[in-house]
Amino acid sequence: MGGSESTPPPPPPVEFDKPWRDTPWDNKALLEKNLRELKLSDPKVKYIRILLAGEVGAGKSSLINSVNSVFQKRITTEALADNAGGRSFTKTYDTYYIRNGQSVLPFVFNDIMGLEPGESHGADPEDIAKALEGLLKEGHNFNPVASAKNYDCKSETSPEDLTYCLVYVIAADKVSMMNQEVFRKLRVIRQKASSLGIPQAVIMTMVDEACPLVKKDLRKIYTSKKIKEKMQECSNSVGVPVSHIFPVKNYHEESDTQNDIDVLILRALTHIVQIADDLLNRRKRGSEKC
Ligand SMILES: Nc1nc2c(ncn2[C@@H]2O[C@H](COP(=O)(O)OP(=O)(O)OP(=O)(O)O)[C@@H](O)[C@H]2O)c(=O)[nH]1
Ligand SMILES: [Mg+2]
């Protein structure tokens, strides 16, 4: 029983025996077809708007580019992404449409300036609250200096201006280091979204940076204990249930699209579009009752 001579216990396993969520790795075509042929529950509404919020450099612009790349079947970089880091690269409120042959898909994304700690840095939560209500004009400049703000908001909104899902974009490798001030700003946005009945989800990016296993093989995403731990952390931090958290890897250095990256993005998008369309349906039924 010589304790000092015994071999140290093996390190705890880094992988679950089985994935804890099913992923249709070999069914990309169906996921894609369903989104290309999507019919919104209110045929009078042309598209549902998905608003992306998150810390500077979390991968919001890259996510829009990645979604577009999946549907164009080639790498696209319309929503410019930063490769230097630091201060927010995106400065204006812009809508991104996804082309589908001669038309566009019935969901659009809004890229906004990243959240930063400090009163006069990064996007102002008040601006994002206005975006949720559909009041921000296209091209609005997220100037964080209040005195320089141009509050030239819309006086009337169409159903297409409203936000149908608020998506927090969080980098898996940075979630434990996120600044408290950024969390405070996220809470303000979350309260506004909740008061408007807007559903919320999380897209957790940079899974390749957070877990070497996943960097080597994306199909390990739901067997990696590290990724599950990071998803739990996201859930605790922003108060979104794990069922509404979707880990993805964005295109960032690839020159061609890849099946497994596409599948994770399409899967996340399918869920997000469904919860957004549920809100459209609720609003439609609400207006019919009036
Ligand atoms: N490894 C890896 N890098 C990523 C991923 N997503 C984004 N990046 C890189 O992270 C950096 C920041 O990404 P952006 O898309 O510009 O982030 P953002 O949230 O739009 O940032 P701001 O506009 O500054 O608020 C870029 O260099 C991207 O190439 C990912 O999933 N994995
Ligand atoms: Mg950006």
Image (cartoon, rainbow, N blue to C red):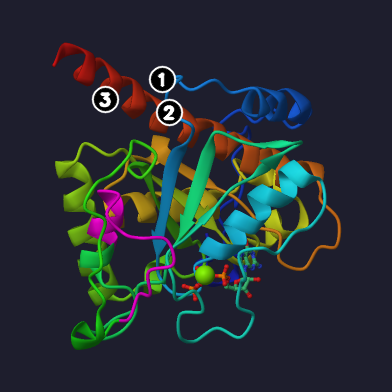
What residue sits 54% from the left and 20% below the top? 39
Residues tagged 3 and 1 counted as in contact (Cβ below 8 A): yes
Q: Is residue 10 visible?
A: no
Q: Main secondary structure of the magenta part?
A: loop
Residues tagged 1 and 2 counted as in contact (Cβ below 8 A): yes
What residue sits 81% from the left and 51% below the top? 257
Secondary structure state at the residue bearing disc 2: loop
Instruction: Report the magenta residues as a range.
Output: 128-143
Front residue of 142/185: it is: 142
Which disc, if any, is residue 42? 1
Label 1 to label 2: alpha-carbon separation: 6 Å
User: Is 27 in the magenta?
Assistant: no
- Residue 48: which quarter of the image? top left
Which disc, if any, is residue 283? 3
Label 3 to label 1: alpha-carbon separation: 9 Å
Judge from the rendering whether residue 1 lies leftward or rightward of residue 53; answer left or right. Answer: right
Q: Position of residue 171 (x, y in %)?
A: 49, 64
Vertical placement of 201 versus 143: above or below? above
User: Is 130 in the magenta?
Assistant: yes
The residue beneath circle 2 is: 45
Among the two numbered marks 3 and 1 on one chain, the one whose residue lies closer to the N terminus: 1
User: Tag 1: residue type?
Assistant: Asp
User: Tag 3: residue type?
Assistant: Arg
Front residue of 170/71: it is: 71
- Residue 11: which quarter of the image? bottom right
Q: Residues within 10 Å of mark 2 (few under 14, many from 20)?
A: some
User: Tag 2: residue type?
Assistant: Val
Secondary structure state at the residue bearing disc 1: loop
